Amino acid sequence: MFSGFMVNTWIAATMVAVIAGVVGFFVVLRGSAFAAHAIPHGAFGGAAGAVLIGVNPIAGLGVFAVGGALGIGWLGRRGRHDVATALSLVLMLGLGALFLSFSVEYAAAIYSLLFGEVLGVPADELLPIAGLGVACIAAIAVLYRPLMLTAITPEVAEARGVRAHRVETGFLLVVALAATMTVPVVGVLLMFSLMIGPAATAGTLTHSPRGAIAVSVVLALATVWLAVAVSYLTNFPIGFFVGTVGAITYGSARIWTGWRRNRTVPA
Amino acid sequence: MNQVLRTLFAPGFFASGPVHAALVVGAVVALVTGAVGVFTVIRGQSFAGHALGEVGSAGGSAAFLGGANPLWGFMGIAVVAAGLIELLGLHRARARDVATGLVLGAGLGMAALFLYLDTTSSSTTGVTVTILFGSLFAVSQSMLPSIVALSAVALVVIAACYRMLLLSSLSADLAAARGVPVRAVAIAYLVIMAVAVSLAAETIGAILATALLIGPPATALRLTKRPGGAMVVAGLVGVAAAWLGIVLAYDSYYWPPAGHGWPVSFFVVALVLVFYLLGGALAGLARARRDRRGGAMPRVAAGGCANEHGAAA
Amino acid sequence: MNGPHPIPSAGDAILDVDGVSVWLSGREVLHDVRFRVMPGEFTGLIGSNGAGKTTLFRVILGLQTTSAGSVLVGGRPLARRNPIIGYVPQKVFLDPDMPLRARDVVALGLDGDRLGIPLDWRRRRQAVDEMLDAVDARHFADARVGNLSGGEQQRVLIAHALISRPRLLLLDEPLANLDIRAEGEVVALLARIAREQQIAVLISAHDVNPLLPVMDRLVYVAAGRTASGTTDEVIRAEVLSALYGQHVDVLRVHGRILVVAGAAGPSGVTVEERDAAADEPGIVALR
């Protein structure tokens, strides 16, 4: 399990988990779960388009992910944010349907793009993944405080001159970068599970932002490592484990904290 | 006149059986999702609507692969998902979206597993694509009665709970004070949405289900503030998008690449978006005219609402 | 009931609102609003929902254009950012599932608008601790902010606004969702801060009574129009009737004030208890 091409998978999986854990903290804090789902999901249409014109599908993925982030940001200024996300998503998927209808061969590539493929990480992709990861972390570090201020007291942020829509668009672009980098291992559809589950669980277990980010990363690592290992052994898709483990972990954490709270309340 | 008709509608349009079915199903689904979707947008539950459509699709494909009637597979899974979302999520929008995301992730993960396990079927990729994209032209006539019946049921329930739904959507506290069982209404609404969305997703695909659930209602709400009127407008806009999309898709057989045709999902989605932008432009014009008549200076665009608590625009 | 206050002179005002009118969606939401707030003064902005209080705040914060009039903050015209104003908004998102402590919220008040990771964490922590002490919130500084009571959350938000050392503190309906006890605590806290640190406080509310003990002046908003002055000057039947454009009565019972839509009759009637020292709520007489 730990030799040859699998080493690449482990390295990539680790990087993916760290990014998902950090970005995911803000996704959950800001209530951007829908966008975190829509951007990778819609980006899939870009991969289809790239294949159509003979370009690396990851490039197409990236273009659509960024386009989706900008689209949500632009539409979100003019109307409800969740409507903007839904419309951007269906537009990208509609275009994806169009591209798919033109191309004839696209069999297994779709499946692995969607749900993840253990064996899908060539060595020469590790560096771009690392690069994108570093860019994500750097952007988060720069936007750290406005991201929190706009999430808690948006009116105060406004009064202090923070342009909320710029912060939001910047954050969505980070999500787009994170989405692009996770495709090889976890698959587009389940990346968002990794961004939501560990961070949401961490939020119920710790009180402070730094603690929550740390726990989120730890949980994401545990989830992905488990998923890679079991997927290797059983051949089941990685996405299945990430999705189900995320939901179960959060559910358990909620039950546990609820039970603990009921116990400490004096009768 | 004949010349115009022949340009707009490619030959054989009006005679084609699949087109008839598509027009009818498209209209029925558009009307139902338009009506249900108005509350989805008001309540800020677009993510749940989309998620239920996708989870329903996964359930439907699983049922199909297992030999059961896909419609009930769709609906069963969607309703279960709705229950889970309500169970996991708190009343606050953020926690609800997190719960929606997790249920969706788990659902899609299981879909991945089903698809993988069904290695005997040679059309695995086809099923994957159908999950996401669906095809309006592939609807069989035999499904029509059950589709119409279920749509009617959904509309009747909405009509029956209309006032309670409206009150609890606008202000949960006020509704609770008036004796409305807010939690029960929320669950009932999620179930109705699950039914409507899985109906749509099975017939026209998950993408279109989301598009018609959110786009036309959002357009309607920009044009009118009254939910009842919005439901009618949303239905009309949805039907317009669906029918125009069908026409274009049929005509596109003659567009390059010839003989292939562009997918109807693409056209309908594009039209939904165009109508939404048009609606927004119209609303903006009306507001500008109203402000000018009142002698006001143009309003400051005080930083857009970047969170889900923003008011409907 | 009202403490002594300095006679306002134009040059010293921390906030000078002069003839401000605002149109929104074809409606005149504010008309010819005039008042001044002096440093260290506690001013109430009283009016029911929809009267225009939040719009007025947005004007003062530089977020809403006016169609007439001017606003001077600290003697200077409005800018997009006014560092001398601290703002406690009405809408905040402090969900119980957010992993944020009270001290994190307060720290964001210090520099939440800056980019990058803060490096001088020692100084920040000290400033946050000081502010938490000032609002008596030190004992729940590390608790999850979403689990705090309404009054405790309000104190955290006040610290969040105060930590940047403003000279004018704006609070939008801070008492709205508090019980009587928490209300009293927050009002007492604000009065103490205003007095000790010479910070002007402008607090909006729909009920004047919790503020009666500490207010220096008030601005009453009704249907977009305002009247400003001391409580006795403003809360009178004639003044409020003119503002509302209809008959309004003012009842004073045991030192509490009630403003009610009046019955038809001479333009507004001031009703007072005949014997304020009596125990029963009592006989009410016309004057």
Image (tube, rainbow, N blue to C red):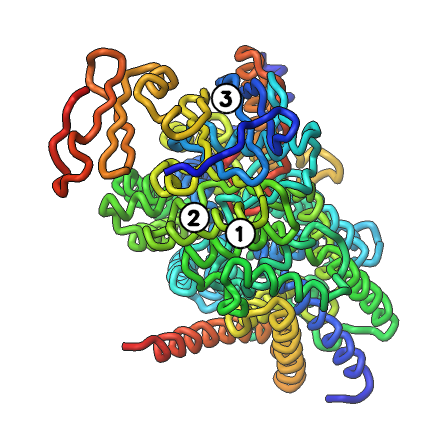
Identify the secondary structure beneath mark 1. Answer: helix
Q: In the rendered view, does B136 fall on the left or right side of B181? A: right
Q: Is residue C196 above or below residue A266?
A: above
Instruction: Tell me which residue sits at (56%, 27%) in the image.
Output: C8
Q: Does residue B111 appear in this view?
A: no
* Tag 1 residue: C158
Identify the secondary structure beneath mark 2. Answer: helix
Q: Quadrant of residue C222?
A: top left
Q: Which mark is residue C75?
A: none
Residue C14, position as x, y percentages in the image:
62, 34
Q: Does residue C220 appear in this view?
A: yes
CB atoms of marks 2 and 1 within 8 Å = no
Instruction: Tell me which residue sits at (48%, 48%) in the image.
Output: C190
CB atoms of marks 3 and 2 within 8 Å = no
* Tag 3 residue: C30
Q: Earlier in the sequence, mark 2 or mark 1?
A: 1
The chain under label 1 reads: C
